[in-house]
Amino acid sequence: MKKIVISQFAAVLSLSSMVIGTPVALAEDTQCRRTLGNVLIDGNLIVPDGASCSLDGTTIRGDVTVKSRATLIVNGANISGSIQSEGANKIDINSDTRTGNNVLLRRGVEVTIDGATITGDLQLESNTGEIRVASNTIIGNLQAKSNKDGGGIIISSNQIGNNLQCQDNDPSPTGGNNTAKQKEGQCENL
């Protein structure tokens, strides 16, 4: 008898939330393999291995994770969490994009970040392709470490709230006109 009463109560509660209009939010990971426009993703976004995802004015209430050999292109998106990649083929974050946390890009190939606002740190580590970081506002630190080969690293015209740190990159980063509390290592003259 108790089971029947409890299940009837759950059904009534569920039905009443639909009638009253109270939204029921279920945050799940969303996989992206295409272009997403001006939509809201309430949760994390994952770009699977080898997939390509474009965010064009998209709002994400969570983190973005880019898997190996995948491509992420971001134009004017608002991401409340972080962007992380391990082994991505291409990451392209363009103007009017805002992240609510860190951007951590490791062991990838091509990286372009141009005109974005990053509320946390930007970390570029052990990437092997061309890296271009220009005209961004980075509230935390910008760190480039152990990036090799490719077309080199260009770091120019960024406003960095804390430190600009570069070490063990080959070739050494180029660029200039960056503002930071402190510039260290290979980036001390940028």
Image: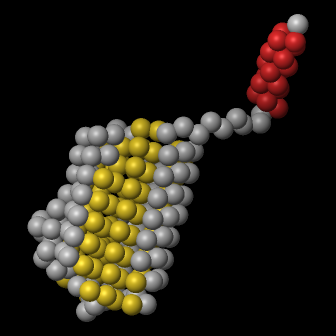
Q: Is residue 108 above or below residue 27?
A: below
The one nearer the camera, 119 or 183, is 183
Q: Quadrant of residue 174?
A: bottom left
Q: Horizontal placement of 113 versus 39: left or right?
A: left
Q: Is residue 46 above or below residue 73?
A: above
Coloration of the structure image = secondary structure
Can residue 53 be seen here?
no
Q: Quadrant of residue 95?
A: bottom left
Q: Position of residue 171 (x, y in %)?
A: 13, 76
Q: Tell how many labels.
A: 0
Q: Residue at x 24, y 56 (%)?
A: 108
Q: Residue furthest top?
A: 1
Q: Position of residue 100 (x, y in %)?
A: 52, 63
Please identify the quadrant where the C terminus is shown. Answer: bottom left
Q: Quadrant of residue 47?
A: top left
Q: Residue at x 35, y 82 (%)?
A: 164
Q: Is residue 145 above or below residue 48?
A: below
Q: Is residue 70 above or below residue 11?
A: below
Can residue 146 be seen here?
yes
Q: Residue at x 24, y 58 (%)?
A: 107
Q: Residue at x 41, y 43 (%)?
A: 46
Please identify the quadrant where the N terminus is shown. Answer: top right
Q: Position of residue 91 (x, y in %)?
A: 29, 57
Q: Position of residue 161 (x, y in %)?
A: 47, 83
Q: Horizontal placement of 9 versus 154: left or right?
A: right
